[in-house]
Amino acid sequence: MVRARKARFAFALALSLLLLGGIAAAITIEMLVRSTRWVAHTYEVKSALGEVNSSLSSVSRARFDYIHSGDESFLSGYETYKSDVRAEVKHVRDLTGDNQSQQLICDELEKAVDQRITLLDASVALQKSGQTDQGAQDRFTLAGVDASAAVANIVQQMQDEEQKLLGMRMTISGDLFVVVICILFGVFILSAFLFWVHYRLLRAELMNRAQLETSARRLSVRLLNVQDEERRKFSRELHDSVGQLLTLAKMNLAMLLEMNPNDKILAETDKVLEEALTETRTVSYLLHPPLLDELGLASAIKWYLEGLGQRSGIQLSVDIAEDFGRLAQPTELVLFRVLQESLTNVHRHSKSMKAEVSLRKTGDKVVLRVRDYGKGMPRDTLEKFLRTGAETGVGLAGMRERIREQLGKLEIQSDGNGTLVEVILPASLPPASHEESAAASS
């Protein structure tokens, strides 16, 4: 149980660490997404600043075309480009609203743009007035160049500031990413170690349980073997002592009956003594039939079925080959005990008045089948027994352990039409059974 608690603790800790790793991974993904947004934001700001320069150049070009051609159609484009410039400047302000230093630079940008547009408006107004003062226009052009250079410098300053901010953010993000990756690596390594510890502890616990179950099965089989040996001894004692005494008493009573043939008490006593002697022999044979040791399993089964049929009234049929031969003593004993338990269940539980017994050799296997035509076993009880060996009492459980120890197989099929019990055992005794047999006999 200590191993089981440790295994559960290791498993829970490993799961907790994996959950922590999942949270760290989520944080990492969030930071990567944030970094991506930062990069996209920087490019958006830079693009907006480029649009300011582009729109301002378009305004200057529209003014230039109007001044040199006098075509007033260029004035509509000029006004449109002016509106675009102011809209682009506002867009830049909105994009950099979370950065105070960029907002201050953006103020300078607005002033420079307004100064540039004021010069352009003055040049256009001069052209509209009809005055052709080329010197004044040249001065406006030179002043516009200086204003454009100031705008370009401010735009470059904002781009540099944005690039610097992006670098700082990427550095912080990269450092955090490295930290989280280290945490993830450590978490997964530790989780793998804890899962390995859990596996080792669980494996040790399962092996310990398997050993306990094996020991319990061996103890159960040993107890059954000891029980069989005690039955053999008790059967022999009944036959050799009580049976002999009853036989002697019956002989003496027979002599008294010859001398007093009309004595009813002696006659009644002789009858009771005969029944006692018969019952003693029956009990002795049921405990351990001597035919099983002397003539083998086939003869013992035929004798047992004949006696059971007379006592129970069940119609019993047997199918055993005449040349069946002998098996190892432990194998014969297991098959006989299985037959006894199966037919006892037929008599007590199935209420069947008919049963069939078959014993055959098939290759290196011996197969015993007992079939009745009674009410059958409940389905849930049968399934639970086949799965766990429970819910069926001591008889079937002992039968199963005997068969398992002999490396055999027990199959039970049951429904409302009856039950079939089939036992398949190796015809030759497994080595482990030799050891159990020797231990039980010692």
Image (cartoon, rainbow, N blue to C red):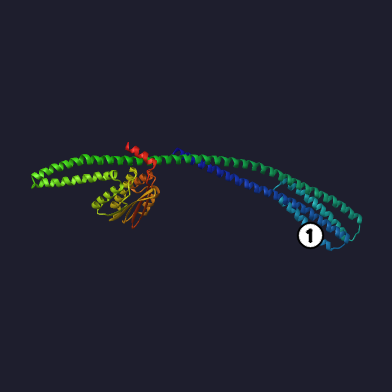
Residue drawn at (25%, 52%), measured in percent from left and top?
309
| Residue 41, horizontal then vertical, whole percent | 70, 50
| Residue 153, horizontal then vertical, whole percent | 80, 48
Locate the C terminus and report the quarter of the image it occupies. Answer: top left
| Residue 313, horizontal then vertical, whole percent | 24, 54
Residue indicated by mark 1: 80
The extreme top residue here reads 442
Residue drawn at (67%, 43%), measured in percent from left and top?
174
Vertical comparison of 68 with 40: above or below: below
Residue drawn at (89%, 54%), measured in percent from left and top?
138
The extreme front residue here reads 323
> Which three-letter amino acid code belongs to the residue tagged 1?
Thr
Q: Dot 1: within a 10 Å radius of its alpha carbon, few (fewer than 14), some, or many (20 or more) residues?
A: some
Q: Is residue 427 left or right of residue 165?
A: left
Vertical comparison of 8 with 348: above or below: above
Q: Nearer the viewer, residue 342 or 377?
A: 342
| Residue 108, horizontal then vertical, whole percent | 78, 48
Q: Which of the 4 image quadrants contains residue 67?
A: bottom right
Residue drawn at (57%, 40%), measured in percent from left and top?
189
Q: Is residue 362 left or right of residue 300?
A: right
Question: Which type of secondary structure does the marked residue at label 1 adopt?
Answer: helix
Q: Is residue 97 visible?
A: no
